[in-house]
Amino acid sequence: MGYLQIYKNWLSDKRLNSEAKKELESVKDNKEEIEYRFGAELEFGTAGMRGLIGYGTNMMNVYTVKRATQGLAEFIKSLGARAMERGVVISYDTRLKSDEFASAAAETLAANGITAYKFSDVHPVPMLSFAVRELKTVAGIMITASHNPKQYNGYKVYGEDGAQMSPEDTAKVVDYIGKITDYAGTPSATIEQMKKLVKPVPAKVDKKYYKELKKLTLSKKAVKSCGKELKLVYTPVHGSGYIPVTTILKKIGVNATVVEEQTKKDPAFSTVEVPNPEFKETLEMGIKLADKIGATVVFGTDPDSDRLGVAVKNKEGEFEALSGNQVGILLLDYILTRLKESNSLPKNAAVVKSFVSTGMAKSICQKFGVTLFETPVGFKFIGEKIKLWEKDKSYTYVFGFEESCGYLRGTHARDKDAVVASMLCAEMVCYYTSVGKTVYQRLQEIYSEYGYVLDCNVSIPFKGLNAMKDMNAVVNGLKTSPAKEFDIYKVSVMRDYSANVKTDIATGATSEIGSPLTNCVYYELENGSFICVRPSGTEPKLKIYFSVKSRNKAEAEEALEKMQSAVKKLLKV
């Protein structure tokens, strides 16, 4: 059936709500818009689904949410009555229609006889992950589009371990979803079902979450000495991090000044261009407040509070936004330092990072005698490592991070946790203050000790219904004719993660990478740098990562410019 006919079918469906009917009628003369809305179905992948808010099969709306939830319900019913009784936890952030979508998901589950625990107010990703584990539910649903622009929303599914659902189970859910062709035909719950099966998440879950986080503090003495006088600015950027971040900082004794204008639950995120704390512009109001009160550090969390952005004053007294990689190595160095100083660093300690994150982590882990593991992009893979080590006791997880501002210490959650990261960064500031340093000074010491590494990533946007297909084609093209150099920087090894094979460029010898499959090409360069190309799993963007090892910043920036030019020429985009 063509997209125009599907559009007409939706428009003539008497079950369509008035908002949908009005919106769809408004685009009746725009064939391109109709094709975008109905020319495809919103893809449900291993990270769930994410898209523009609006009506159509290719957009985020109450009908696509109910259809996805019905697919999840069918999967849960296939597991038996006990799984249905255990149920699903549902959380949501401050985005447009997040609460409405969460309620629609709860109703659909109830209509299928499945228990649904729904948070009564916005809660971040890590607290949803924790609640799944604490309530021992069979799954979790998070309504969020993370750090995407305001026009987006999304739907993420979690497994019983609190990590995003495994690829194997996701495939089963996707199969059930694909069989549902009538978007408006999902069952509606009766009043009795709603009363019996839709329940609030108990208040004790939040209390236990904070209790677990307090166990992870590393510098109580330093916090006690300067926490109350600390000048630190925090902004939730209109997101779900406001209550949990300020609560945990208060509980450990750290003073934080909040950007009041950005505490409002504003689905338009009207004070920022994009609610992504990776960008200095997003932290601008926090930086202005910091200058006003004389603070040296600014924190910011994204709408679902799984990412933490940090800005610190440099030696010139100006605020500098740290990259996710820089915050990652600062936290890694701090955590391992404090564990060692307190004689509590496990002998089998392990750190996990995504393979696109900074190469500097390897040197830091080697110094402390800690094993470093690399995984594909996606925190669920870090969660899988935690789950494995809890079973076989081969390693003890101490920290995990991704360059996209995602960090996790502790095993209370199985996804990025900006709440615990905020707590750790705050006490890290206290710790360095207590020994007469700033965080920025410690970062420079790390560069002096391990050598300078410049980490950078570039995103190339793709448009249209075939965006994902076109991006994958670009990456696939790199595998057929392996690059041997990027300007003056020679390639030593090429990793093809889609085939789990790495190739020695000089000899042609191949071996297994030992990693889950994902469409990605990774070039190890002879000087210890790397370049990686992969399609984003959540946005129509081709992502290119550079980790440039050099003697100093100036040389690294020069090398980066040459590498970027060479990559651009190779990709022809």
Image: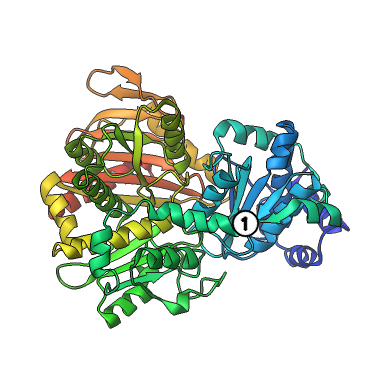
Q: Looking at the image, which is closer to me, 190 or 329?
A: 190
Residue 29 % position (x, y): 74, 63
Determine the residue positioned at 27% across, 64% down: 223
Residue 226 % position (x, y): 24, 69
Determine the residue positioned at 41% across, 37% down: 376
Placement of the N terminus among the 4 image quadrants? top right
Badge 1 marks a residue whose secondary structure is loop
Q: Looking at the image, which is closer to me, 141 or 4?
A: 141
Q: How is the image coloured?
A: rainbow
Given the image, on which type of amino acid does mark 1 rest?
Pro
Q: Which residue is mark 1?
A: 202
Q: Looking at the image, which is closer to me, 475 or 528?
A: 528
Q: Residue furthest right?
A: 14
Residue 433 % position (x, y): 19, 65
| Residue 198 location, quadrant | bottom right
Determine the residue positioned at 15% across, 51% down: 447
Crowding near the residue tagged with mark 1, few <14, some 14–19, many ≥20 C-alpha atoms within 10 Å = some
Residue 367 % position (x, y): 17, 38
For residue 391, side relative to residue 485 (left or right): right
Give the vertical position of 513 relative to 294 (above or below): above
Give the vertical position of 458 relative to 86 (above or below): below
Give the vertical position of 81 relative to 272 (above or below): above
| Residue 53 location, quadrant | bottom right
